[in-house]
Image (cartoon, rainbow, N blue to C red):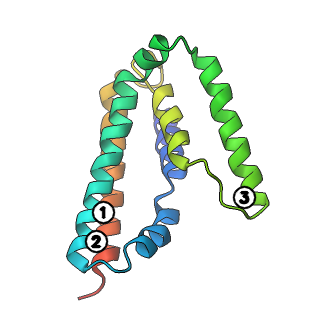
Amino acid sequence: METELIKFVAAIFVITNPLGAVPLFLSLTKEYTSKERRRAAWLASITVVIVLSANILFGELILRFFAISIPAFQVGGGIIILLLAISMLQARQSPTREGLGATSTMLGINPRCHAFPSSGTACGVRHRAIGRLWTCSRLRVAGPR
């Protein structure tokens, strides 16, 4: 149980890549004031929580609605990760986004998963991790006083 929890937290951290997003965030918000940057960081964090929570709660229903099996989705996610890796090796920007990997991970963690007794555990871990990442990004954006 504890090992699966560590794997889950590590997978979300690696897939969402908050440390790699800091330079991108700073370059996109270079003309923002400190207050606007904090607001943008807050909105981005809330958006991540909402999207990942929706995926964990409704992902399997959405896949069933479109008649996509979990193994087919896993193959598709693997192809996306392969394309990302190839584009990284060629030092080109990829049109795919890391968010797709996070989405597929969250769809994989659902109430029928035996690693967690309930989806609430996974949601709680994810929300705590995102909260910590938001706090770190807020401290980084605000800078030393």
Relative to 75, residue 33 above or below:
below
Q: Position of residue 10 (x, y in %)?
A: 52, 47
Q: Which residue is mark 3?
A: 88
In the structure shown, which secondary structural element does the residue marked by tag 1 occupy? helix
Report the front residue among 76 and 130. Answer: 76
What's under tag 1, amino acid-wise? Ala
In this picture, residue 61 sits left or right of residue 92: left
Q: Residues within 10 Å of mark 3 (few under 14, many from 20)?
A: few
Q: Which residue is mark 2?
A: 37
Which residue sits at x=49%, y=50%?
Answer: 16
Relative to 41, residue 115 above or below:
above
What's under tag 2, amino acid-wise? Arg
Which residue sits at x=34%, y=80%?
Answer: 31
What's under tag 3, amino acid-wise? Met
Q: Position of residue 79 (x, y in %)?
A: 71, 35
Rounded to the nearest angstrom, the CA distance separating label 2 from label 1 is: 6 Å
Q: Which mark is residue 41?
A: 1
Which residue sits at x=48%, y=68%?
Answer: 24
Q: Residue furthest left?
A: 35
Rounded to the nearest angstrom, the CA distance separating label 2 from label 3 is: 28 Å
Q: Residues within 10 Å of mark 1 (few under 14, many from 20)?
A: some
Asked if the residue under mark 3 is in contact with the one under mark 1, i.e. CB atoms within 8 Å, the reply is no
Which residue sits at x=30%, y=82%?
Answer: 143
In this picture, residue 3 sits left or right of residue 57: right
In the structure shown, which secondary structural element does the residue marked by tag 3 occupy? helix
In the structure shown, which secondary structural element does the residue marked by tag 2 occupy? helix
